[in-house]
Amino acid sequence: MTLIKSISGIRGTIGGTVNDNLTPIDAVKFAAAYGMWLRRQSSDKTLTVIIGRDARISGEMISDLVSKTLIGLGINVKDIGLSTTPTVEIAVPLENADGGIIITASHNPKQWNALKLLNNKGEFINGAAGAEILEIAKSDAYEFTEVDDLGWFLNVDGYIQKHIEEVLKLPLVDTEAIKNADFKVVVDAVNSTGGIAIPALLERLGVNCVKLYCEPNGQFPHNPEPLKEHLTDISALVVKEQADLGIVVDPDVDRLALVCEDGSMFGEEYTLVACADYVLGRQEGNTVSNLSSSRALKDITIKYGGKYTASAVGEVNVVIEMKKTNAVIGGEGNGGIIYPDSHYGRDSLVGVALFLSHLANKKVSCKTLRNSYPEYFMSKNKIELTPEINVDAILEKIADIYKEEEVNTIDGVKIDFESEWVHLRKSNTEPIIRIYTESTSQNKADDLAKRIIQKIQSII
């Protein structure tokens, strides 16, 4: 079964049977449920929804199904076409729309697609809204309009360029310093819409761009998740081209990974750290990342006199906490940069502009910059459990055992020790406990994970 319905949207593999895969019928049902939810929020108001998609092969088909379904509900559709997740997020408020749908499965392989749902601020819908939409879809509670009340459809071109203009307007984007630095950069956009957006941004910034997999045809040349093991081609090309760095984005361009001039990974966790270092050096404030992100962000925040807060895992949770604490920057350890001066969404275009501004002002190499940050290492593990085991009880017991340490229970259990931490989370779909650890060496991170696993097994 490869259809996953959650409060943040619906995703699955193309083809197969209804309710088991992302078939046309499933796409229509979920789009209709979202449209009905929007109508419940607005009484008699005429509604408009922004739609955009990444370059997946199935994107045009799913987008057409979604837009025609919304029109059938009396909702107007503005389609910005090939786009990025942050571009759609920016377009919703700029167009004064009532919501948005991004047709993308993010870092999933090409056979997957998804509907990501936004509210009228261009932000991901919250848990309560997602639960309501799921209930509408479950009960097939749709009411389509009569012929005279159908919505209209409009293609809107040029939104990636508008997005770039919004990025260039940001006061901390130092376009002059970037141009003077005369950077040479290799870009791997995994043949999706980042191949349109990132080179266009770099051109405006005066950066010499070498393109790798930048044809937006949806034929991903490697696993699209921007992890070290998938990025051997760009690592080699950065060295061959004697480039200053490499830039990697996922298919919908909300995750940013960087490659140093020697072909080594800057580290997804450290993309946010570097951007926060730049922002906090020029703007007082606080930061937020999720519980499974590196401690390095906390170290940098304290260095500048700010307050760091950890949120539950998930972009919507990070955004909620950022608003509560008036954070000036935040995000997730997967390379997602959220910069409120632009908008409350992960945005690789903003991340690229901030990072290059930082590098240009520091006047050091990418590798030297990376080596200037606290060195932490992560280990990610899981324990498979039999269904009858009470996972919540196990997590409560672990929290009690380590109650003398700094314990956070907003999302599973996170235990902060003096120089390392462990985060335990229950899976929502299967009887497993996910175990994330971080320490000052890989061996220490692995050893901490082993000790916690042994503790859990002894409790069981």
Image: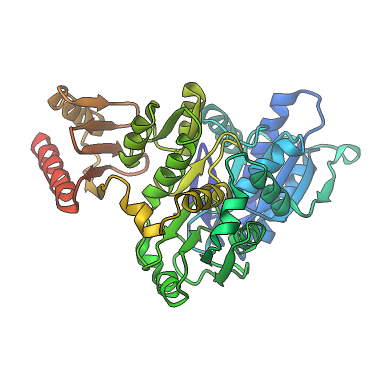
User: On the rendered structure, is 174 left or right of 275?
Assistant: right
Residue under the image location 67 percent in, 51 percent down: 164
Residue under the image location 46 percent in, 63 percent down: 245
User: In the rendered image, is residue 31 in sight?
Assistant: no
- Residue 449 % position (x, y): 17, 45
In this picture, is 141 found above or below 154?
above
In this picture, is 396 found above or below 79?
above
User: In the rendered image, is residue 411 in sight?
Assistant: yes
User: On the rendered structure, is 132 left or right of 405?
Assistant: right
Considering the image in quadrants, where does the N terminus appear? Answer: bottom left
Considering the image in quadrants, where does the C terminus appear? Answer: top left
User: On the rendered structure, is 172 left or right of 425?
Assistant: right
Pick the residue in front: 323 or 359: 359
Q: Quadrant of residue 411?
A: top left
- Residue 376 % position (x, y): 26, 47
Residue under the image location 69 percent in, 36 percent down: 99
